[in-house]
Image (cartoon, rainbow, N blue to C red):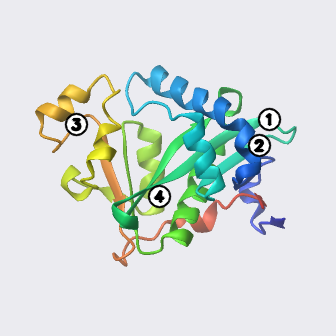
Amino acid sequence: MEISADLSFQTDFIILTATEAHGGYASQISELIAEGAKSRGIGRGGRPAAYLVQKMTDGHAIIAFSPTGQLAGFSFLDIWEGGRYVANAGFIVAPAFRGQSLGREIKVKAFELARNLFPEAKIFGITTTPAVIHLNNSLGYVAAPYSELPQDEKYWAGCAKCPYYDVLVRANRKSCLCTGMIYDPANASQHGSLLREAEPVWVR
């Protein structure tokens, strides 16, 4: 275990790359993701537990625990178009641990994981949440038209459960209520200051 030298953002949460050993939490995480999407009334919905287990086994997920060992948060990477694009997906913080900067820490670690595993990939996302938009901006994401996002049919099929899917369809997938955002490593002007300022204290 390494401890960050920057204690100005110290938290007691343990945040690490998930492995197959964490598969037992998959059902709970799946429920949290589904509940989060339902509470927002918009979004791509949940993910089956088996899908999340595979993400953990592949080393493509971040999981967070409280000091007492409770599941506190999660996020995983979705890879599209042969690794040209990567999305930080399934981002969730358990209700009991919200408002404690954990979401920011998970988001940063998921971003770092994506950059380490897929250094040439564009990292993207679509969101309606102002806090996520602000955080993405801090990491170097910029607003992007839908034409710059993956065109894989399976990606857009994931929006079918959203109550506003008809808006996306009517717009011929050129726009919707979500804001498209993208981090392009080829753009030298994009540098996330948050990566330098808010690294989690507990890193395994």
- Residue placed at 47% from the left, 74% from the top? 119
- Residue placed at 55% from the left, 42% from the top? 51
Q: Compared to 107, does 167 lie above or below? A: above
- Residue placed at 47% from the left, 58% from the top? 138
Report if residue 98 is visible in the image. no
Mark 1 crowd level (few <14, some 14–19, many ≥20, 10 Å Cα) = few
Number of numbered tags placed on the structure image? 4
Q: Within the image, what quadrant is residue 171 found in?
A: top left
Residue type at mark 4 is Ser
Dot 2 or dot 3, earlier in sequence = 2
Report if residue 115 is visible in the image. yes
Q: Which residue lies furthest to the right in this view?
A: 68
Residue type at mark 3 is Cys
Residue designated by label 3: 176
Residue 90: image x %, image y %?
52, 41
Secondary element under disc 1, as helix, strand or loop, is loop
Residue type at mark 2 is Phe
Dot 2 or dot 4, earlier in sequence = 2
Residue designated by label 4: 138
* Marks 3 and 1, how far apart at CA: 36 Å
Mark 3 crowd level (few <14, some 14–19, many ≥20, 10 Å Cα) = some
Residue designated by label 1: 70
Residue designated by label 2: 65
* Marks 1 and 2, how far apart at CA: 5 Å
* Marks 4 and 3, how far apart at CA: 23 Å
